[in-house]
Image (cartoon, coloured by chain):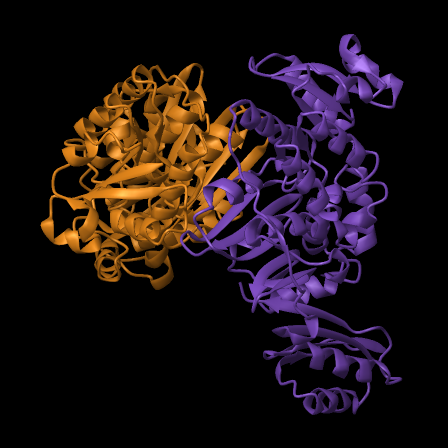
Chain colours: A orange, B purple
Amino acid sequence: MKIGLIGLGTVGQGVAEVLLEGSFPSISLINVCDIDRKKANIAPHIFTENPNDILDNPEIDVVVELIGGIEPAKTYIKTALSNGKDVVTANKLLLCSCWKEIMSCVKDNGRKIRFEASVGGGIPIISSINQALVANRISGIYGIINGTTNYILTKMFEEKRGFYEVLKDAQEKGFAEKDPSLDINGDDTLHKLFILSCLSFGKMVDIGSIYKEGISRIKGQDLLYADSLGYSIKLLGIAKENNGSLEIRVHPAMISKDHLLSSVSYNYNGIYIIGDLTGPLLFYGQGAGSLPTTSAVIADLLSLSSNEGFAIPDVKSVSCFLMDELKLRYYIRFMAIDKPGVLAMIFGVLAKNNISIESCIQKERGEVVPIIITTHETLEGNVIKAIEEIDKSPVIKEKTLTIRIEEI
Amino acid sequence: MKIGLIGLGTVGQGVAEVLLEGSFPSISLINVCDIDRKKANIAPHIFTENPNDILDNPEIDVVVELIGGIEPAKTYIKTALSNGKDVVTANKLLLCSCWKEIMSCVKDNGRKIRFEASVGGGIPIISSINQALVANRISGIYGIINGTTNYILTKMFEEKRGFYEVLKDAQEKGFAEKDPSLDINGDDTLHKLFILSCLSFGKMVDIGSIYKEGISRIKGQDLLYADSLGYSIKLLGIAKENNGSLEIRVHPAMISKDHLLSSVSYNYNGIYIIGDLTGPLLFYGQGAGSLPTTSAVIADLLSLSSNEGFAIPDVKSVSCFLMDELKLRYYIRFMAIDKPGVLAMIFGVLAKNNISIESCIQKERGEVVPIIITTHETLEGNVIKAIEEIDKSPVIKEKTLTIRIEEI
């Protein structure tokens, strides 16, 4: 099987190095391409600046696309497919933005596509869902699938430091990008969750309709309060079927410290997936980085070279479950002026909105203090309405933070 | 693809039911066989008592062997292979006892064999090692792969009850067999570990040369002392390459409570496997039971029906690493008469054998009391020698227990 590789970033370099070592005699890398001429030194004898040298080369059986982003990656992949080549990609943004377009192109050309590296780095989650779990009806996915945010939340808790301080440290250590916004704001988690959801449920929703919330509003004190209540806070991607629509959302969530996902720390990923036959499964490992991702790309190539008949399900568009209709318990942190009557006001508004209180902590003293409330199960719509009203009060000095408590 | 199924125990029934529902149009079950005529009611129209009706039926493409044990399963599998059929089996005892014989027979007949259900129930560990991780050199496997013993150890700790009491309870709840000896004594873990080790390292040792120790000597107090020292106790199967030989062993081990394996509780399995590219991975789920195992058997069938070219590595016989040469830290529980001079005697013998002490606890008072010692890293041979000598003393009232402390 002859391979052409486009994109020599850190993952592309890793893949090129492993393939050029020659440990996989069934696979031979015959062309690598990058727009940056300086990358030629990785493999000068097979380097080209022109992707068409790969896309139009009739000798090449499989194109590995590792440039990322939507264009020109999409054009390259579609050209490769129409030229009769199979494709391996790690491009989660492209897959979730153009799922149907790419999969139709695969089908129309009778080719194959593999994308194990798009979710969970070296964790074999795509092949597990598509092959090993294929006898199961999957009822839910709960994923910690962004290493950067998991690292930051872990360090904030362990070292009792603030978000921005830990972010800076993570950037210095290479666990966060220079521009970490896609990680921090939940986009990266959303892209991966979208792919897992297509494969697990054969269903998708308009990506713009998916609720998404990042971690930048979490404070060190939230992690400590969560801990004292028996929870850790993780940025979760959650997907499940709910009355024919798809409940899919990305946000920080409180998980019981007894749950295995709560022990997934630092830059690690953990994907908890529930099959009707298997029961719950957890897949854990490094979700990013050059070597783990290289492992996934090579596994995809070997799967193509062994002519594996891996079926990607047809994906149907359905409606997205409305967040207002969620029924969960909530952690709510108000930042309020420390004076008599504030609690009464808050409790009054909550009661008016049918929200019953499970616990309330107001330990600190000062001018503005956190008031921590956890609720019994209640409708999210009610919580939002109540907080909107409470936040209008002059005694509330900061936008109130809510964190969903997930019983997994 | 036409299937014949031999063995209608709980897993066989589960597989038959799922296949007869017709959710997998590419697979059709055309014969089921059991020696017990009463099982005919599961599928009377396709039932036979005679396995040759399946083995000699030229219509059948794949034989699913779910009777377990070595004979007649081995004969059935070899006959099926020579008759040009592929085989799916969950038979861990047969695979580890006759690995080379079975794999040669597969090769000689140009057939395929699948055995996802032999290890870890519904956890896709076999396909992950064989396909997804194939680009990796695996450096170690640490597995909690017996649900019965994990359930017992978890309950002993949680409910502060003794081994036999919890075992009885586990039997009543269906988490332990009527005759649980294969689980309790470590044999079941050993069989599964052997298979994982063949696949991960392409190496095997004489199965009789593998060190194996069960859990029946663990007392509730060991779990509590371990906890106070920051550890949990798990029955582990460990395999790694060590200077060309294979270090492979099964025994209770102390694992730091911070390690994810330590959170694998109740009847769940967890397999921690370290690849050079992926880094550490954990696979977690239900390692037994009718439905999870059915999930694995169906995945194997679908993998055969999609004509997947899954390569099973050639396995080389190598020597087994000698336990005497292990270098670990140890937890040692002496049961000694509570009188002056006992500790001095124990410490003296340990010192003579070059064993240095990390901690010592002797909290209880009474006639015979536990003395808990943890050592710094030391040679296992020295520990054994020292304990042999100490156990000869009349002040020691019970065979001394050692538990290896594993830094994973």
Q: Give me the residue at 51% from left, 24% from top.
A: B306
Which quadrant holds residue A7? Answer: top left
Q: Is residue A70 left or right of residue A224?
A: left
Circle count: 0
B140 vs B198, nearest the viewer: B198
Residue at 85% from the left image edge and 41% from the top image edge: B178
Looking at this view, is B303 or B289 the one in front?
Answer: B303
* Left or right: A390 in relation to B32: left
The quadrant holding residue B245 is bottom right
Which residue shows up at 71% across the image and 47% down it?
B96
The answer to which of A347 and A114 lies nearer the viewer is A114
Asked if residue B259 lies left or right of residue B350, the reply is left
Q: Is residue A389 visible?
A: no
> Dividing the image into 4 quarters, which one contains the N terminus of chain A?
top left
Pinpoint residue A2: horizontal percent, then vertical percent: 32, 37
Residue B8 to residue A180: above or below: above
| Position above or below: B304 against A220 | above
Position of A216 relative to A59 (above/below):
below
- Report the front residue among A165 and A25: A25
On the image, the x and y values in percent for residue A48 come to 15, 43
* Relative image position of residue A216 (x, y in whole percent): 24, 46
Q: Position of residue B218 (x, y in %)?
A: 76, 62
Residue occupying image coordinates x 63% and y 51%: B144
Residue A59 in view in this figure: yes
